[in-house]
Image (tube, rainbow, N blue to C red):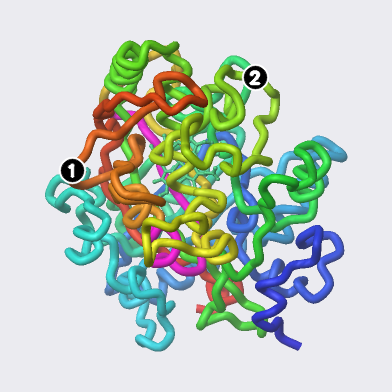
């Protein structure tokens, strides 16, 4: 029997156990990996393709072979992770296939066979989307992204030499059927402690919605049993039925892809200026911008870094409702308010219950690009290849970017934009606490050091739809 809406919404207490998945078995065998849990490889190459209309049948054949060879299901990804833990055997190259609305059209799909999400159908270049996200004009995007992008092929591995050889081989095979109009090479950046960081130097990838039993049990055991923040999520926030799936439980997910350039030198100077203005230490100033210290310690919990090996994600803002410890505009408070938006009295229409607020969550799968020496401070050419999965682009990525990050009014009036990713016009300079936990504030305009260089909305089709093209 096919899964019901309730099965998707309400996972078992401990999430999905891929080794004993019960009614979710077909789903995880037909769902591409990297969606419910990141693939975890250190290097990845992203190839953006345009199909050659005169070779569509060959393109379909290529997609089928590529999927059979490299695309791992959620189930296989998990089996390989078990083998890796038990026997140290690496899963090798990992592949994903993502298609844009144009990609589906050129492959000959009828409108009713194309995934329905509205922004996905419009495309990231459409004027309506661009103006609502306050993105730069397409003519100012990096050249490769100005093309129509039909497909994104992701290949990842821990061994960079193997990966690059594989990419060469794939590029050769693709010659007949597609043009590679753009390519990105991503890698995981780490700090001295071995933690994953982004280019500004902050530990990244900490807070994620959790779906899989192993992740849930680990978080419960090591991080306070979800007493302050329950990271579990139903599959309905990340999966939708694939209209072309060949099983009754064939699902896919929408992928938002954005290249976000980071000016590290500019950011650090601004961080030092903010610290001077508030008369606080540089690292606390950085934490007020991000909401966590470099090491991942949430600033709502502490005014100094705690150097935990695994930063906590079991916290909320209940003891900081006046935002004297973590400003409302701090990046993580704006992108996951953990109940703040349900507290609102002053913003009719903006208040939501925690249950509704949690439906805006996204599964982030970003990776860095550019300079790989974390001691350097690049101004251009480095940043984040931002990827996130969701079931409803308008209500998830777009909502977070437009209604929270880009909005001056968030939880209350006059909060200001997210200083990391907020785009567009702001009428105010945000207020920052001069003494952690006390009400005194100073205004400071932190500039935007992240620039959107291009992107697209994609769909991750089920495996059976790709092998039956
Ligand atoms: C969390 C950096 C872009 C959404 C974080 C964290 C860092 C960070 C350091 C804290 C660690 C963690 O919880 O994983 C950045 C940088 C970006 C960027 C440097 C751009 C270059 C974005 C974008 C979005 C986003 C575009 C979505 C619109 C989130 C969310 C969290 C987060 C949802 C988790 C918040 C929480 O649950 O506490 N980001 N981010 N980020 N970011 Fe970003």
Instruction: Tell me the residue at 87%/40% (across/down).
Output: 86
In the picture, measured across the screen, residue 168 lies left or right of residue 253, that is: left
Q: For mark 2, does the 10 Å Cα neighbourhood hold few (<14), some (14 to 19), or many (20 or more) residues?
A: some
Residue 107 in the image, given as x and y percentages of width and height: 36, 76
Q: Relative to 213, say whether 427 is above or below.
A: above
Q: Relative to 55, say whether 5 is above or below.
A: below
Looking at the rendering, in which quadrant would you find the N terminus? bottom right
Query: Mark 2 highlights which residue?
Result: 306
Q: Relative to 4, say whether 367 is above or below.
A: above
Query: Mark 1 highlights which residue?
Result: 427
Regarding mark 2 in the picture, which secondary structure is present there? loop
Magenta highlight on residue 16: no
The image quadrant of residue 305 is top right
Which label lies toward us, 1 or 2?
Answer: 1
Q: Relative to 85, say whether 354 is above or below.
A: below
Instruction: Tell me the residue at 76%/60% (across/down).
Output: 15
Q: Is residue 185 visible?
A: no
What span is colored magenta in the figure?
Answer: 381-399
The image quadrant of residue 150 is bottom left
Q: CA distance from mark 1 to mark 2?
A: 36 Å
């Amino acid at each position: 029997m096919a899964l019901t809406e309730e099965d998707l919404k309400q996972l078992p207490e401990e999430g999905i156990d891929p080794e004993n998945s019960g009614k979710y078995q077909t789903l995880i065998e037909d769902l591409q990996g990297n969606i419910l849990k990141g693939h975890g490889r250190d290097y990845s190459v992203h190839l953006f393709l345009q199909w050659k209309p005169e070779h569509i049948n060959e393109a379909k054949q290529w997609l089928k072979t590529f999927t059979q060879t490299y695309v791992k299901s959620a189930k296989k990804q998990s089996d390989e992770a078990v083998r890796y833990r038990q026997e140290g055997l690496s899963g090798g190259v990992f592949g994903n296939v993502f298609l844009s609305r144009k990609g589906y059209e050129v492959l000959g799909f009828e409108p009713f066979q194309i995934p329905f999400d509205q922004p996905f159908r419009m495309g990231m270049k459409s004027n309506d989307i661009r103006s609502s996200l306050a993105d730069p004009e397409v003519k100012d995007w990096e050249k490769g992204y100005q093309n129509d992008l039909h497909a994104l092929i992701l290949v990842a591995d821990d061994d960079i030499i193997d990966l690059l050889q594989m990419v060469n081989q794939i590029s050769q095979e693709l010659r007949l059927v597609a043009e590679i109009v753009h390519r990105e090479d991503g890698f995981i950046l780490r700090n001295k402690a071995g933690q994953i960081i982004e280019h500004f130097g902050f530990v990244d990838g900490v807070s994620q919605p959790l779906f899989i039993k192993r992740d849930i049990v680990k978080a419960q055991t090591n991080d306070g049993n979800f007493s302050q923040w329950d990271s579990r999520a139903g599959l309905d926030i990340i999966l939708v039925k694939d209209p072309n799936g060949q099983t009754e439980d064939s699902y896919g997910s929408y992928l938002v892809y954005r290249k976000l350039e980071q000016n590290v030198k500019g950011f650090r100077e601004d961080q030092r200026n903010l610290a001077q203005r508030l008369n606080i230490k540089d690292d606390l100033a950085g934490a007020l911008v991000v909401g966590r210290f470099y090491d991942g310690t949430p600033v709502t919990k502490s005014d100094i870094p705690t150097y935990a090996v695994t930063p906590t994600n079991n916290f909320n803002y209940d003891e900081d409702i006046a935002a004297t410890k973590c400003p409302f505009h701090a990046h993580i408070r704006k992108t996951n308010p953990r109940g703040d938006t349900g507290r609102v009295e002053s913003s009719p229409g903006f208040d939501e219950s925690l249950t509704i607020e949690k439906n805006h969550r996204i599964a982030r799968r970003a990776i860095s690009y550019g300079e790989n020496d974390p001691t350097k401070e690049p101004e251009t050419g480095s940043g984040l290849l931002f990827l996130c999965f969701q079931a409803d682009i308008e209500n998830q990525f777009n909502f977070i970017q437009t209604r929270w990050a880009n909005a001056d009014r968030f939880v209350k009036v006059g909060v200001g934009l997210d200083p990391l990713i907020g785009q567009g016009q702001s009428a105010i300079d945000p207020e920052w606490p001069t003494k952690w936990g006390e009400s005194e504030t100073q205004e400071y305009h932190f500039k935007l050091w992240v620039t959107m260089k291009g992107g697209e909305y994609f769909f991750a089709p089920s495996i059976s739809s790709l092998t039956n093209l």
